[in-house]
Image: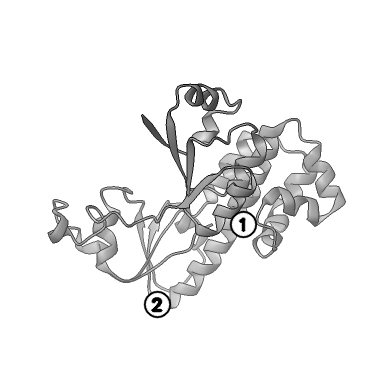
């Protein structure tokens, strides 16, 4: 028997599912599209010889192995031949709208609302709230890949504030905040460099807020369905610019 899930460790905080499946000799596969640092240090006892981890980014694989997971591999996104191919060849159905055609496009979330939701959900101490943007900007260019490791390297005061958070979930929330804010700053800087080429930006309405001061022409389209729309969208771009977190 095989169990396949996405980011499955998040729902097995105490290792109960892992233990039960091991006793039943059930093999598992889990695809992770987040950084390992946002998951690994929170939970113990989840590694298993029956679990195969697939990482979306090849350079995330060593972190999983270092944490004791024996079976780790790289899963290449966007390579399903039955889905990621020209419409006529795959029979995706209705033709794509003409408004999707672009010389240059970018598809991605602005992260503005995600950062705002994280701030609204967790009551961080004042010392962390006042500094998170500067800390995230430094994290974006730092050698540390983990927000937790960077927080400790940034300053003793930040490390102390991080350690004083009430539990592991609060610490994860702060690490997520730093990662998302760093991603927001990085993506916005990249997109602004595209604006000389009149790009089509596909994503949440946060892009209209982020670029409201721009006088250079660009187009915006609301977020597209990952499974049904994007396979039809990408072939209509001469160049699609990609940047991850």
Rendered image coloring scheme: one colour
Q: Is residue 122 above or below residue 22?
A: below
Mark 1: give few (<14), some (14-19) or many (20+) Cα within 10 Å. Answer: many
Q: Which of marks 1 and 2 is nearer the N terminus?
A: 1
Q: In this view, does 197 lie above or below 26?
A: below
Assign a secondary structure to mark 2: helix
Q: Where is residue 135 in the image (x, y as percent from the top left)?
A: 72, 56
Q: Mark 1 points at which residue?
A: 182
Q: Which residue is drawn at 13% across and 53% down?
A: 91
Assign a secondary structure to mark 1: helix
Q: Which residue is drawn at 49% across and 56% down?
A: 57
Q: Residue at x 81, y 47 (%)?
A: 159
Mark 2: give few (<14), some (14-19) or many (20+) Cα within 10 Å. Answer: few
Q: In this view, does 190 lie above or below 120?
A: below
Task: Kindly indicate the quadrant of the structure image that contains residue 150.
Answer: bottom right
Q: Where is residue 30 in the image (x, y as percent from the top left)?
A: 45, 40
Residue 197 visible in the shown view: yes
Q: Is residue 97 left or right of residue 174?
A: left
Quadrant of the rendering where the N terminus is positioned? top left
Q: Mark 2 points at which residue?
A: 197
Quadrant of the rendering where the C terminus is positioned? bottom right
């Amino acid at each position: 028997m095989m169990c396949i899930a996405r980011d499955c460790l998040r729902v097995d905080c105490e290792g109960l599912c892992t233990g039960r499946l091991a006793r039943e000799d059930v093999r598992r596969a889990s695809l992770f599209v987040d950084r390992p640092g946002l998951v690994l240090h929170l939970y113990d006892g989840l590694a298993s010889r029956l679990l195969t981890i697939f990482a979306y980014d090849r350079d995330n694989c060593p972190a999983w192995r270092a944490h004791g997971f024996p079976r780790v591999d790289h899963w290449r996104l966007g390579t399903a031949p039955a889905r990621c191919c020209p419409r006529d060849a795959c029979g995706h159905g209705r033709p794509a709208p003409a408004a999707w055609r672009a010389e240059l496009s970018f598809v991605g979330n602005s992260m503005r609302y995600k950062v705002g939701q994280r701030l609204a959900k967790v009551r961080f101490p004042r010392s962390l709230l006042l500094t998170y943007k500067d800390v995230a900007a430094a994290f974006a260019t730092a050698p540390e890949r983990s927000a937790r490791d960077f927080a400790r390297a940034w300053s003793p005061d930040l490390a102390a504030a991080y350690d004083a958070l009430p539990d592991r979930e609060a610490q994860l929330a702060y690490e997520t905040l730093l990662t998302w804010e760093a991603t927001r700053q990085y993506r916005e800087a990249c997109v602004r460099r595209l604006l000389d080429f009149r790009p089509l930006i596909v994503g949440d309405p946060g892009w209209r807020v982020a670029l409201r001061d721009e006088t250079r022409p660009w187009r915006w389209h609301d977020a597209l369905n990952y499974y049904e729309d994007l396979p039809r969208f990408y072939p209509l771009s001469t160049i699609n610019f990609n940047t991850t977190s």
